[in-house]
Image: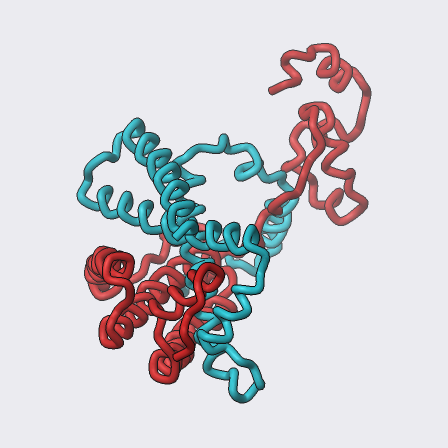
Chain colours: A cyan, B red
Amino acid sequence: MYIAANDATQSMAENDAGTGILAKQRLARPVSPHLSIYRPQITWYGSIINRITGSLMSGAFYLFGAAYLVAPVMGWHLESAVLAASFATWPVILQFLTKTVFAWQFTYHTFNGVRHLVWDTASAISNKAVNQSGWFVVGLSTVSAVALALL
Amino acid sequence: MASALRPNMLRQAFASPSARLISSTLPAFQPQQRFLLQRTPLALQQATFQTSAKRELLPPLPQRLQGTVNDAQILGEPNALHGNYHWTFERGLSAALLPISLAPFAAGSLSPVLDGAFIGMIIIHTYIGFSSIISDYLPSRRVPFWRKLFDYGNMLAVFVVGWGWYEFETNDVGLTEGLKRVWKAGSSTVPAS
């Protein structure tokens, strides 16, 4: 934005000594704590866990897709039969725990996704309803994850 | 301020004759000369007003002025393809993922066509999700290079992963059947295909 030299107003361009010091002073000011002091609540914890579960599942999905593509070149064996056989050699309790953890990602993300879609119809958006549905989703996903792991 | 509950400390601070009194009470106001010479540590200046130690968990970001301080905020052009239609498509796809992800539990596994459709839907859903994450944590104005890099990487991943899962669907058993085999690997013997 160009201001004529004979304008009545004086422009504060970025390179002015004044604003340079202003910017440096801003860096010196303390920053209020935010994430470290915000009270844990099912609202924002539930939201970030929804994002984390989605990212973990997608990350694993992407990693496997890319790995399977380059496996012949790298000399890996990622066929389903090989994966199933090696998983079967794990200790049973480790199998169960791994399956529970993976299943929980899926169930929580799915049920919380349903919760999001319900909100998109502008229902259950009061504070109380959000808290109730949040905890309901946590309980339901835990129970169904254990049930899936026992399949 | 916590110091209000501790009048003694406050009184002490103002009682001590100090040439740096102004800058200790108003640390933001520092004469230019002082700034160029040695600076008193900020913690010492604030000692009279805070009881806990200062923790720089997330320090202030670089302060860059775009244009002059009198310019209005620059907003992007509204675009329905990236706004309204994007939102509708995102929710429609998420809703469509529900029946197709629950069907394998009822039917056992999916036909290759449905399985391929499921994979495609997952990839597009992931693309939308990852682009939300990228735009949240890598704002263009702060880190334009990394934002562009991750955006292009996200798009490239769609094709690489799509190709990889296509190979898995063609040469192997597919997503739902593969998951089922690994899931039930420990319990019963599965005949090799």
Residue at the far bottom in the pictured view = A73
Rendering coords of residue A81 (x, y %) = 46, 75
In the foreground, A151 or B7: A151
Name the residue: 66% across, 17% down: B3
Q: Identify whether B46 is placed above or below B74.
A: above
Residue B124 coordinates in the image, percent (x, y): 31, 68
The residue drawn where x is 60% and y is 20% is B1
* A94 shown above or below B82: above
Residue drawn at the location 35% of the way across and 36% of the way down: A134
Q: Position of residue A22 (x, y in %)?
A: 59, 48
Looking at the picture, does residue B168 appear above or below residue B77? below
Instruction: Please tell me which residue is depicted at 62% across the width and 38% down the height of the picture.
Output: A30
Q: Is residue B37 left or right of residue A1?
A: right
Q: Is residue B66 visible?
A: no
Instruction: Provide residue B82's location: percent of width, then percent of height.
Output: 26, 63
Q: How many numbered marks are there?
A: 0
Looking at the image, residue B176 sits to the left or right of residue B27; the answer is left
| A134 sits to left or right of A73 | left
Q: Picture quarter containing residue B140?
A: bottom left
Q: Nearer the viewer, residue B41 or B159?
A: B159
Left or right of A74 on screen, residue A50? left
The answer to whether residue B173 shows anywhere in this view is: yes
Q: Which one is in front, B173 or B86?
A: B173
Q: Is the N terminus of chain A in the top left, top right, bottom left or bottom right quadrant?
A: bottom left
